[in-house]
Image: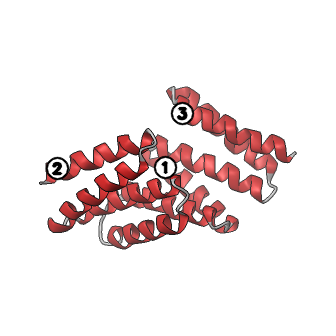
Amino acid sequence: TRTLSKALTGRARVHYCVGRHDDALADLESAMVVATQEADSQALAEMLLEKATILDWKFQYKESAEAAARASALIANLNDEALVLKCDLATARSHFRAQDFPSSIAEFEATIVTAESLEDHTTHVISLALLGAALVAVDRLDEAQVCLDRMIDLSQRVGDRLHLAVAYANRMLVWMAR
């Protein structure tokens, strides 16, 4: 059943990356049942963080924050720096969506430092993207520009075209705010 849980979680990731959010959530719900039956807190926490991302992409910010909070409660009992980092990103994203920009800015800055030390490129560039947008929201445009330039550089260095496109799109926010 652990194999089934992993397969469903993997399929959920593919589904939400191609915009099939409801299918992704259904897969995750099935996988979470298995993880709960097996008392696999780590797998369940990972699935809850995936669920939080999907719900965020569906603009269901309250539900996303709730999934992140559930994951956080599970992660508190684990010793997994990478999972803590992903949870910290989800929490920061929730604060950003709630327009609590001072909290989200501080949290994104912290996730950037940790992601850099853990060499987690994806968390690093997502944190930079959201930090850049948060800085624009509080009219710290020069800092936002530096942040997004850094994201562009990181994305170009590893050939990450998806996040490179996000950086360019977010950089337009800076230009429009000027």
Classed neighbour count for the residue bearing mark 2: other residues with Cα under 10 Å, few (<14), some (14–19), many (≥20)? few
Q: Secondary structure at mark 2?
A: helix
- Indicate the amino acid at tag 2: Leu
**Horizontal side of residue 8 vs 112, given as left or right:** left
Front disc: 2 or 1: 2
Using the rendered view, name the quadrant where residue 162 is placed.
top right
**Horizontal side of residue 46 vs 128, given as left or right:** left
Of marks 2 and 1, which one's residue comes earlier in the chain?
Answer: 2
Circle number at residue 64: none
Q: Residue furthest right?
A: 178
Circle number at residue 4: 2
Which residue is disc 1 drawn over?
A: 115
Quadrant location of the N terminus? bottom left
> How far apart are the alpha carbons under marks 3 and 2?
29 Å
- Where is residue 91? Give x, y as percent: 51, 65
Which residue is disc 3 drawn over?
A: 162
